[in-house]
Amino acid sequence: MSASPFDRRAIPEGAHVSTLPARDGWQLRCFDWPAAGSPRGSILFQGGRGDIFEKYLETFAHWHGQGWTITSFDWRGQGGSGRLSKAANCGHIEDFASYIGDFHDFARDWQAATPGPHVVIGHSMGGHLVLRALVERAVRPEAAVLIAPMLGLKSPFGAALGERFARLLGGLGNPARPAWKTNERPYTTDTRESLLTHDHDRYSDELWWQQTNPGNVTGPPSWKWLIEAFRSTRELRDTPALAGMNVPVLALIAEIDGLVDARAALATVARLPDARIVRFGEESAHEILREGDAVRNRALGEIDGFLDARAPRR
């Protein structure tokens, strides 16, 4: 269980929550926590599908205590950044390129406005989008960290057949409709909590934030999101540009991850020319940074050591 003196259910003093317009005027909900004193550098942290940045306040506090400026925003169409479907709480997107466009513009302005070195960190879907943005040169930080990155989707039929079924079923009606009603994996009996973390207290924090700000809750993905997730992960896995992406990368992989394909992540990251992989076994579910203290502390130690070596203080 977690043992932290930090209040995970309050925006920390000195941090700011605001909205910023994307290039088309879409409002993105943002978090900014400037470093106190001499800055160590700046971290842009991006969560996964359906995430809100409040889930990671405890981790932000760890980095902020080391002198990092922390920034994050909710992805378009989820969290506090609005919805793109008429279906209540449905996480919809027409094309993952929209995520990359938002990330490119936001990261450009972030790098111009914050002290270096600059580091981008992505969890789950955020890990996929960070790596895709790096490969497409939409962002150029000193280092990047991928945490349980969504580089392949879990499917009972395999990736190719899963994508084919998603396209077939998504095409039978409005593709912006929810792909399912409950749970993160509709074909499993695992609870949502067990898929995410073994730490009940940290899982309860997410439920508290959902109850406090119900408008920020994102439910199941749309069929179109699912189709585009299959396509984007497949194209990223297949691109020869992986071999030319030389930003240093640390990847934390949960080998028994129930939400994303850990084998696909291991194989994809192994193709990068400058990458270190750290594996977690049965002790970790999907949300490595929100696991029990032993797992979380190990993960933070790996990240801290990697950043000291690859993004040293200027």
Image: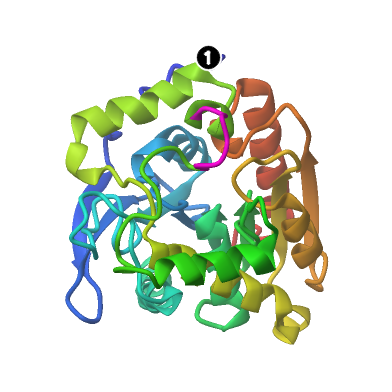
**Residue 115 in sight in this render:** no
**Magenta region, main secondary structure:** loop
Q: How is the image coloured?
A: rainbow
Q: Amino acid at mark 1?
A: Ala
Q: Position of residue 198 (x, y in %)?
A: 59, 23
Q: Give the residue at x 56% y 73%.
A: 232
Q: Position of residue 96 (x, y in %)?
A: 44, 73
Q: Position of residue 82 (x, y in %)?
A: 21, 58
Q: Is residue 188 magenta?
A: yes
Q: Give the residue at x 72% y 47%.
A: 253
Comparing 74 with 187, the one in front is 187
Q: Is residue 252 left or right of residue 278?
A: left
Comparing 217 with 276, the one in front is 217
Residue at image mark 1 = 3
Comparing 40 with 93, the one in front is 93
> The C terminus appears in which quarter of the rendering?
bottom right
Q: Relative to 68, is 25 above or below?
A: below
Q: Which residues are magenta?
A: 185-191
**Can you tell which quarter of the image residue 18 is in?**
bottom left
Q: Is residue 284 left or right of residue 278?
A: left
Q: Give the residue at x 23% y 63%.
A: 85
Q: Residues within 10 Å of mark 1 (few under 14, many from 20)?
A: few
Q: Position of residue 156 (x, y in %)?
A: 66, 50
Q: Residue furthest front?
A: 172
Q: Is residue 45 magenta?
A: no
Query: How many numbered badges does the structure rendering display?
Result: 1
> The N terminus appears in which quarter of the rendering?
top right
Q: Is residue 42 left or right of residue 267?
A: left
**Residue 65 in sight in this render:** yes
Q: Relative to 41, is 174 above or below?
A: below
Q: Relative to 288, is 269 above or below?
A: below
Q: Give the residue at x 20% y 37%.
A: 214
